[in-house]
Amino acid sequence: MNLRLVFKITGKTLLVECVLMLLPVLVALLCRESPRPMLFSILITAAAGFCLSRFRPSRTGFFARDGLAAVAVIWLFTSLFGALPFYFSGYFPSAVDCLFESISGFTTTGATILAAVEELPKGILFWRSFTQWIGGMGVLILTLALLPSLGARAHYLMDAENPGPQSSKLVPKSGQSSKILYAIYVVLSALEAAALLIAGFPLYDAVVTTFTTAGTGGFSVRNLSIASYGNPAAEIIISIFMILFSINFTVFFLMIGGKIRSALRSEELRLYLSIIAVSVFLVTLNVSPLYGSTGKALRHSFFQVASILSTSGFAITDYSLWPELSKILLIGLMLCGSCAGSTGGGIKVSRILMLFKDFSREIRKSIHPRSYQVIKIDGHIVEEATLKGVSVYLSVYVFLFLFASLIVSLDNFPFTSTVTGVIASLSNIGPGLESIGPTGNYSAFSDLSKITLSFCMLIGRLEFFPVLILFSRNAWRRR
């Protein structure tokens, strides 16, 4: 492994993080708060970034394993130094809680240990939300957009960080692809912020809510999340943008290029929208008696289905109190997640689509054993290696889920809280059910459980292999 080059890229990423930390400093000054927590964090992060960026690699070769390892190391370091503002603020009980909150932010999970969010300074809350905007599109994609001359083979980094079983560059050069992705990201973010301002949101709330919607993260600056605003128009706006940000960004790129029909023919997009429609319909029927009117039930159902499926984790109601059918549907949506190539988490709709097509193929092959069957998505043949990758991914997901659940179960919390807490962490959703539902938090868990869940968030966001490769002896060999 080319460790010197990995450290060099990590150092440059930390320097980018320092620049991003200046924005919450400005917010703190405008709100007449002390910027010292952010300033201390900037100094420490800048020193570490400068030292790491001074590494001179003996060779410029950069291959797949280096890309995977670099992504894991960079995300770990970014989260570690991103926790410093929380630590210096004095509002977090322990260093483990700071790291938990930081990893939850950058991985866009939205799980929190805070019970009274509104007590924190606005500058710290701004950084907390901003981490989700940074992590939504990807820490490295942002770095490649700002520093395209890293000297490494950038496509390995994008492939390792880009979620989903199929990753493709929008244009031949990775640096240009990252710029296009961020241009779409920024434009959508600006549109949501403007819409929320028109709907009556205060400027600060509109900006931080946009950050966490764009990253499909779900952090809120209010104790009761979006429910505290009591603004139906804003709820609809946020619902729509949660869905937009959880759609494969390639769809937007095709639309911008005038290929609207090609974009709308996407099988993944059609399946995703169908899942939303069917889920909203079933949940609305199931919860209508709780709300007294179909219209109100539909609004709550649409928001929560969009929130869970996009892995945002916002809430306008305590869905832990919904009937069992609705809760089972929500758990299913937690597992499913959003589209590949979006800011959302979960198993991804594209994998679900491939799984069903592979299942259908096996049935046809059992009827016609000698026939040659191929799987196509959007008219393109899916390679057998990709299908195998989906099976491996699901196997690893199940194994890690069981392993993490065993560790978290040592806290003796109810079964539902333990299981949904692990699922919500692996799928980067945040809230689970019961004690960790939309009105709860993760503060009661032990440090061991918090570290385990933090690991689940990180490994879930990077889709396992970039982190798991660090535990492989072969990855550390020179050749």
Image (cartoon, rainbow, N blue to C red):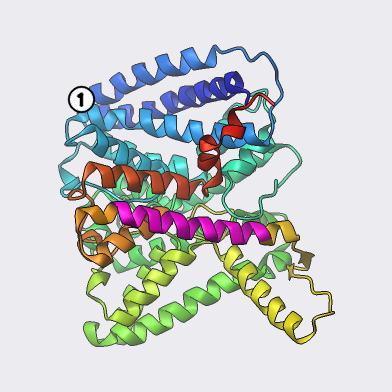
Say if the magenta span includes residue 406.
Answer: yes
Residue 145 visible in rendering: no
Front-most of residues 154 and 413: 413
Prevailing secondary structure of the magenta residues:
helix
The residue shown at (51%, 37%) is 471
Measuring from the top left, give residue 252's x and y in whole percent.
62, 56
In the drawing, does residue 195 fall left or right of residue 226?
right
Please provide percent x and percent y for residue 20: 42, 29
Please determine whether, in this image, residue 115 is positioned above or below residue 49: below
Q: Categorize mark 1 by other alpha carbons within 10 Å: few (<14), some (14-19), many (20+).
A: some
The residue where tag 1 is placed is 34
Q: Relative to 329, say whether 158 is above or below.
A: above
**Residue at left 78%, top 71%?**
374
User: From the viewer's perspective, is residue 172 above or below residue 273?
Assistant: above
Q: Residue 244 or 393: which is nearer the viewer?
A: 393
Foreground residue among 278 and 66:
66
Q: Amino acid at mark 1?
A: Ser
Under circle 1, the secondary element is loop
Q: Tell me the quadrant of the picture where the N terminus can be found.
A: top right
Residue 156, picture quadrant: top right
Total marks placed: 1
Residue 407 seen in render: yes
Q: Quadrant of the C terminus?
A: top right
> In the image, residue 412 lies at what x, y percent?
19, 58
Extent of the magenta region: 388-407
Judged left or right of residue 90, residue 265 is: right
